[in-house]
Image (cartoon, grey):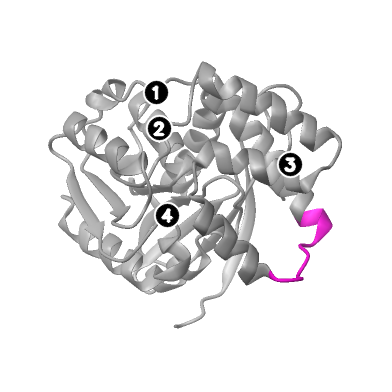
Amino acid sequence: MNSHESHDQYVRSADGTRLAVRRVGSGDPVVLVHGSGGGLHSWAAVADLLADDHEVWMPARRGYGPSDVPAGTKSFKDESADLSAVLGAVRESSGSPVHLVGASYGATLSLHTVATDSRDVRSLAIFEPPLFAAGPQLAPLLDRYRSAFERDDASAMTATLNEVTRVPAKIVAAFAAAAGDRTPDPVKARRSAIGWLHDLEALAEDSTDVARWSSIGVPTLLMQGADTWEPMPSTMNALAATLPRARRIIWPGQSHFVTMTAPALVADTLRGFFADVPA
């Protein structure tokens, strides 16, 4: 893997929130949006592979360091305004519309943003948005997570998040075994926990209605792992039916963690998709 020099900057959202953005490479612009628990580092391996022929921008979403943590309850409306500000900054810098890519929660946010305003978006690629984890059903889990967060109970927070994401018990056990006796950096862990809290707030106020994305008209790629657990496969089937002109790829042997386990596969897929999108 080639290592490219990165540059960090801030973009200010409509409400004044400062968003940290990492930029690497040169060429047609790409914005990579991270999922819950992520940050500037989340897409690093994929970005480095794309940076030979693309200018890659990676924002840290509000609530995740080193971006601001605004007061109050977060909504997708807030974050769509954030992402639109980033897209506008990229368009102004490059003079070109953007290839927008989102993973997990970042994919849901990308859908919200493009459905609201697609002016700066050339294409959309989304990986496994958790559209099933939304609405009033999430309220009790949000309350439980907030309580665990306020008493800084890491194990209770993790247990609640496993219910939200519906990760199978055997996968949870495998992660615990892999972690061993290692303990996460407490500052980073707390920043991640803050981000998760605000993501859950937005999800609890959202809807599971997939049909609302039918208005999205930009070229779209749906990406998923063949080994990701239900209800993600059913969710992706519903989304594919809603966006009938979208291209879809299902990677054998991959799961929800493909950006970490197989970054070259993701980068190659994205590069091929971008190349087919009309200028």
Marked residue nearer the N-terminal end (2 or 3): 2
Residue 208 circle label = 1
Which comes sooner in the sequence, label 1 or label 4? 1
Check disc 3 and report the residue beneath it.
Answer: 156
Asked if the residue at tag 4 contacts the one at tag 1, i.e. Cβ–Cβ closer than 8 Å, the answer is no
Give the x, y percent position of residue 213. Answer: 29, 26
The residue positioned farthest toward the right in the image shown: 151
Please say whether residue 181 is one of the residues in the magenta stretch.
yes
Q: Which residue is mark 2?
A: 131
Disc 2 versus disc 1: distance between alpha carbons? 6 Å
* Image location (x, y in percent) of residue 130: 43, 38
Find residue 273 and report its horizontal and vertical position in percent: 22, 57
- In magenta, the rendered stretch is 180-188
Which element carries disc 2, helix, strand or loop?
A: loop
Alpha-carbon span between mark 3 and mark 1: 25 Å
Q: Earlier in the sequence, mark 4 or mark 3?
A: 3
Q: Residue at x 39, y 70 (%)?
A: 262
Amino acid type, callout 4: His
State the SS at label 1.
loop
- In the rendered structure, are the residues bearing label 2 and label 1 in contact, judged by CB atoms less than 8 Å apart? yes
How far apart marks 4 and 3 lie (CA) works out to 22 Å
Q: Nearer the viewer, mark 2 or mark 3?
A: 3
Identify residue type, mark 1: Thr
State whether residue 13 appears in this view: no
